[in-house]
Each structure stands twice: as C-alpha cells, then as structure tokens.
Image (cartoon, grey):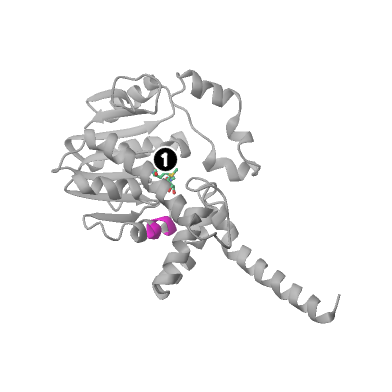
Amino acid sequence: MQLADIKKLRSIKLFLNLYNLIFRPLKTEQANYDYLRWNGLIDLLWRVGGNSTRAFLTKKFLTSSPHYLYPTNKLYFLPGEYEERLDTLRTSRADIANNVIAKLVNSEDEVLEFGCGHGLIVGAVAGFCKRAIGVDVSKAIVRVAEELNRNVKNVTYVQVSGLDLKPITDSSLTFVYSIECIQHIEKVHAVTFFHEFYRILKPGGKAFIQFPDLTRPAELDAWMDGTWKVQSERSYADLTMMRIRYYTPEELRILLTRIGFSSVIFLDYDLNPVESASIYFLATR
Ligand SMILES: C[S@@+](CC[C@H](N)C(=O)[O-])C[C@H]1O[C@@H](n2cnc3c(N)ncnc32)[C@H](O)[C@@H]1O
C-alpha cells in the first residue's frame, strides 16, 4: 500500500470516528436516556443550520431510532428509500389518529399527546380538534415533530423533563392520550404521570392511555419468553427504556381511582370492550 493510500484511509477513519462520536448516541435514542446529552448540540445545529441541515437531522433521527424506522444509522439512503419509509410511518400513524382517536375527540377538544415522538399522530389529530399539543422528553424528536408537521397550524410541540408535565397548566385540556410510551417508563414514574394527567385535565376531561396488558396471553408469553432481552443485542443498560412494563387492568383501576378519576374503563383498538388488540384505559377526571 502506498503512503497516499494510508493517509486517505486514515482520513476516512477520522471522519467515521467523528461521525460516530456525534451520531452513535442517536442510534441508541429511546433505548437510553443518555442520548439526551446531545440535545444542546442538536438544538444549536437546528437553530444555526438552514433547511438542508434540518432535513438531514430529521432524516437522521427518524432513521436512527429503534422505535421509528429501525436502527439503521445510515450515512446514505438509496433514492426514494427514506421517503418510502416516512410514507409508511405517516400512513400507520394517521390510521391511529383517524380510526382510534377521532372516535373519542371532537372539534371543541383541547388535546395533548404524551410521548408524541415524531408527532405524526398528534399532527393528524390536530385536524379534528380545537388545538393539540405533543410533548416528549427528547428535544431532538420535538424538533423533528415540528419539521414534519410544519404545515399544521393548531399543533405545538413541547419538550418536557421526562419526570413531569410542568409546562402544562392545571385544568387546561379536555383530552390526553398516549401510545407506546407508558410501557417505556418505570412504573414508579408512570404513577406520577397519571397524577399529572389528572392535574392538567379539566373536570370531565378524559385520559386515554395505551398499555401492555399482562392478562392477555400474547403479552404474558412475550414477557415469559424474554423478548425484551433477545430483541436486541444491546447491553442491559441500553435496554432500560426499550423493555416493556406490563400492567393488569385491575392495578390500573386501583391506581387511577385512588388518584381521583371517576370512571375507568378498558377499550381495545376498535374501541369495543377488550378483545385482543391493542388495549387502552379510558379514565374520566
Ligand atoms: C415509541 S415512541 C411513540 C411515539 C408516538 N406516540 C407514536 O406512537 O408514534 C415513545 C416516545 O415516548 C417518549 N418518552 C419516553 N419516556 C418519556 C417521558 N418520561 N416523558 C416524555 N416522553 C417520553 C420517547 O422519547 C419517544 O419519543
């Protein structure tokens, strides 16, 4: 090998190391709160960069999170590849907005999605309610949500601490919902959020929260088979957020009633009494 080739290889390696230094934490986004240490840098890039920087960061976040488009920390996409993935994501999230949330929300409702991620569900929900707010612990994903939903006028995205909903005032909303979020939070913290949902809702307002129900055979099998362990090659620490926290309807009824909710019922995805699909509790303030 010639000296020039070695130098070239070294500079490629240096570039890759720098790239990984910045983006490797993003790869573990949602799997580990550590990624939050990049919030300041991401925010700065977002502010000073132009449209193409924002488009690049959006792509990066949507494709580096195991929760969205699978952990492909890619440098390059084939033409149309990213757009196709984004399209699939938009369609699946709009399906939840139109076929689930729309059946419970009307044009007068003021709505909050807890753990909104890319904001594609709450962006669609904004189309049929008075105003909508998406909150998330990740500043980066809040930026992504703003970018992907910039044409939606009555939605705002807010970063929260991960431990409470302080930026949201008491009794200010009529409907709170959450999908694929509570399961990533330690139960002891989730109870704080149940209190927070009660605090921010107006009397008569509703909390509609999806959760993994341990009394369903499929969920019990998943837990017993340890899918949370084998679904990834990550370390235990990385899995803290990825792994699933299961609930029984009975324990949720006890907790929510204790907090003050007046009625707690359980609904499946089609909003019928529970059968087998994704399950939610609907609690009235
Ligand atoms: C699997 S994503 C779901 C996104 C969206 N709800 C959906 O279904 O498309 C979970 C989101 O919850 C957020 N999250 C996790 N823990 C949180 C917390 N303690 N407070 C606020 N957001 C949280 C994560 O940052 C992530 O964006």
**From the viewer's perspective, is residue 271 above or below residue 169?**
above
Q: Which residue lies furthest to the front in this view?
A: 79
**Identity of the amino acid at label 1?**
Cys
Q: Quick one: 21 or 13, which is closer to the camera?
A: 13
Residue 132 image offset from top left, x and y in percent: 24, 49
Residue 262 image offset from top left, x and y in percent: 22, 25
Question: What residue is rendered at 54% in x and 36% in y?
Answer: 243
From the image, give the main secondary structure of the stretch colored magenta.
Answer: helix
Q: Does the magenta stretch include residue 187?
A: no
Task: Examine the rendering and report whether any part of residue 92 can be seen.
Answer: yes
Q: Residue 188 occupies which quadrant of the picture?
A: top left
Ligand 1 is found in which quarter of the picture? top left
Q: Residue 96 occupies which quadrant of the picture?
A: top left
| Mark 1 residue CB less than 8 A from any atom of ligand 1 | yes
Q: Residue furthest left?
A: 108
> Disc 1 designates what residue?
181
Locate the N terminus by quadrant.
bottom right
Question: What residue is rendered at 58% in x and 56% in y?
Answer: 73
Locate the C terminus by quadrant.
top left
Residue segment shown in magenta: 140-144
Task: Examine the rendering and report whether any part of residue 162 can be seen.
Answer: no
